[in-house]
Structure formats: C-alpha cells, structure tokens
Amino acid sequence: DWAYVSVVCNDDVAYESNLQVLPKGLPLGYLDLDSDGNVALYVTRIVSPSNEIEDFGLEGAVDQYERAHLTYIPAATIKCITVSLGTKGVTSSASSEGAAAP
C-alpha cells in the first residue's frame, strides 16, 4: 500500500499527502491520477522551495472530513511524483509522463 505521496511542481513547491492520517471514505479515495497525468490529492503538508513547511493537520477537527481538502494539480505543472510504500520505506519516483496510480 502507498503510505505517502509528494508531488513537486515546476516552481519547486511540494504538495504532500500522508495517506495514513487521512480519514476513510473520502471522495475519489486518497489520490486520483487521470490518463493525462493530472493529479488530485488530499494535501496534508506543503513545502516551499526555501523548505518552509505548512502543515494541514487533521487532528482536532470537529468533523474528521472538515480539514480534508482535495487539491487539483495540472500535469503541465508537475515536475515529479514520489511515492513511499507501506512500512518498507521503499520510495519510487516517476515523472508526470510515466506516473501510475495504485
């Protein structure tokens, strides 16, 4: 199973999703990748090019879905996608041209 996804855009901003902390039953599952390479994911953290981190913690939400917002990232803006698998710590990277969904 995928545990973590990071989408780095051409402006070097990384949109990250920790799939293990997201609530079950979100629309579209945790991640959607269409045949054109466009990505929709629930962002739990954004990392700027200067390494500033903005966390979107889901803890403390009155409703578990309250802070889960789907973010659309067009394929033309994606530099790379990195996926961490399960607890094995295996990381796999793919460009937007060769990315695959689980």
Image: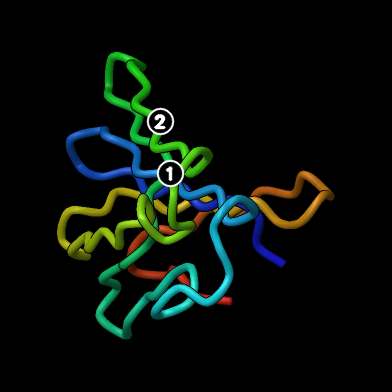
Work out which quarter of the rendered image holds the N terminus and state it: bottom right
Q: Closest to the observer: 62 or 38?
A: 62
Q: Are marks 2 and 1 in contact (CB under 8 Å)?
A: yes
Residue 65, labelled with which disc?
A: none
Local SS, label 1: loop
Residue 44, labelled with which disc?
A: 1
Horizontal arrangement in the rendering, residue 22 relative to residue 43 (left or right) = right
Horizontal arrangement in the rendering, residue 47 relative to residue 71 (left or right) = right
Give, as a three-letter code, the residue at label 2: Asp
Residue on which the image places disc 2: 55
- The residue drawn where x is 22% and y is 59% is 73
- The residue drawn where x is 36% and y is 55% is 66
Horizontal arrangement in the rendering, residue 86 relative to residue 31 (left or right) = right
Where is residue 56 drawn, in percent x and y?
39, 37
- The residue drawn where x is 74% and y is 49% is 90
In the rendered image, the residue lying farthest to the right is 88
Where is residue 32 drawn, in percent x and y?
39, 75
Please determine whether, in this image, residue 53 is positioned above or below residue 86: above
Horizontal arrangement in the rendering, residue 24 relative to residue 14 (left or right) = right
Please determine whether, in this image, residue 94 is positioned above or below residue 28: above
Where is residue 51 drawn, in percent x and y?
36, 17
Q: Gap between marks 2 and 1, in whole Å? A: 6 Å
Give, as a three-letter code, the residue at label 1: Thr
